[in-house]
Amino acid sequence: MKTIKARKWSDLTPAQQRAVLTAASVQLSLAATAWVDLARRPESQVNGRKSLWAVGIGLNVLGPILYFSRGIRR
């Protein structure tokens, strides 16, 4: 069985480093936007509990996308 060795930042090529930074920027931007919207939106306009959405937004990139697509009452 092969073991997977953790790679250091310096082991990545410049293109890989840019890709990681871009993905992290997108994730943080989506999460920050969703959290601000959630904080400002009245409870009556949110599907479900705001506290659960706040946790869900921070889990991964799908959290903010699900919040904007399913969490807001139209």
Image (cartoon, rainbow, N blue to C red):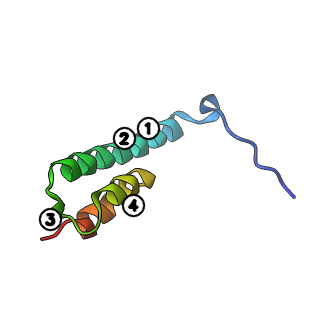
Q: Amino acid at mark 2?
A: Ser
19 to the left or right of 12: left
Judged left or right of residue 15, residue 52 is left
What amino acid type should be assigned to the residue bearing mark 1?
A: Leu
| First in sequence: mark 3 vs mark 4 | 3
At which x and y percent is residue 29?
A: 30, 44
Q: Please state, as top left, top right, bottom left or bottom right, where the C terminus lies in the image.
A: bottom left
> Helix or strand or loop: what does disc 2 sit on?
helix
Task: Name the residue that disc number 3 marks.
Answer: 44
Residue 3 disc label: none
User: In the rendered view, does 43 fall on the left or right side of 66?
Assistant: left
**Foreground: disc 3 or disc 4:** 3
The answer to whether the residues at label 2 and label 1 have Cβ atoms under 8 Å apart is: yes
Q: Which residue is mark 2?
A: 25
Q: Which mark is residue 21?
A: 1
- Single out the residue that lies furthest toward the right: 1
Q: Mark 3 to mark 4: distance in Å? A: 23 Å
Q: Are marks 3 and 4 in contact (CB under 8 Å)?
A: no
**What distance separates the C-alpha of mark 1 from that of mark 3?**
36 Å
Mark 3 Cα-neighbour bin, 10 Å: few <14, some 14–19, many ≥20: few
Q: Is 44 above or below relative to 61?
A: below
Q: Earlier in the sequence, mark 1 or mark 3?
A: 1
- At a point 33% along the width and 53% down the height, the residue shown is 54
Indicate the secondary structure of the residue bearing disc 3.
helix
Determine which residue is flagged by label 4. 62
Give how far apart the Cα atoms at labels 4 and 1 are: 18 Å
Q: Amino acid at mark 4?
A: Leu
